[in-house]
Image: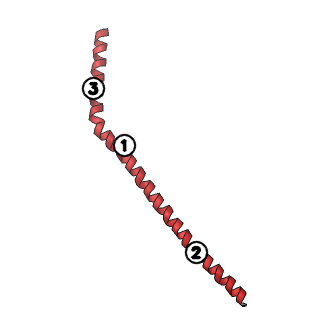
Amino acid sequence: MSPEERELLNRSVALAEENNRILLKMKRGQRWSSIMRTVYWIFIIGSAVGAFYLIQPYVDEVKSMYQSVSAGFKSLNK
């Protein structure tokens, strides 16, 4: 193997190793992005469910008031 071929081979190996490091960093970044996106959506959905349970008694109270007013209007019509 000539010295020029050896130099080309060494450069190719170095370039392949550098590409491998870059690809591993990209894969790690993608994994973290996926984890954070999952945490984000769990937080959003959990907040919505928590808000629903927090205001559910008030919604039930408004619904019962509406039903009583509706029943009052029906009795007036009769």
Q: Residues within 10 Å of mark 2 (few under 14, many from 20)?
A: few
Residue 12 figure quarter: bottom right
| Mark 1: secondary structure | helix
Locate residue 36, reporting x and y percent.
43, 57
Secondary structure of the residue carrying numbered label 2: helix
Q: Quadrant of the C terminus?
A: top left
* x 71%, y 90%: residue: 3
Identify whether 3 is placed above or below 41.
Answer: below
Residue 25: x %, y % from top left: 51, 68
Residue type, mark 2 in image: Glu
- Which residue is identified by label 2? 18
Check if mark 1's residue and mark 2's residue have beta carbons within 8 Å. no
Please state which of the two labelled residues, at mark 3 or mark 2, is closer to the viewer: 2
Whichever of callouts 1 and 3 sits on the residue coming sooner in the sequence is 1
| Residue 64 numbered tag | 3
- Residue at x 44%, y 59% (from the top left corner): 35
Relative to 72, say whether 28 is above or below: below
Residue 56, image quadrant: top left
Residue carrying label 1: 48
Mark 1 vs mark 3: in front: 1
Identify which amino acid the numbered label 1 is placed on: Ala
Measure the C-alpha gap from mark 1 to mark 3: 23 Å
Check disc 1: other Cα within 10 Å, few if <14, some if 14-19, many if 20+: few
The structure residue drawn at horizontal position 29% and vertical position 10%, both measured from the top left corner, is 76
Q: Secondary structure at mark 3?
A: helix
Give how far apart the Cα atoms at labels 3 and 2 are.
68 Å
29 left or right of 66? right
Residues under labels 1 and 2: Cα distance? 45 Å
Q: Is residue 2 above or below residue 40?
A: below
Which of the marked residues, 1 or 2, is nearer the chain's N terminus? 2
- Residue pictured at 26% horizontal, 34% vertical: 57
Query: For the residue marked with disc 3, what is the amino acid?
Result: Ser
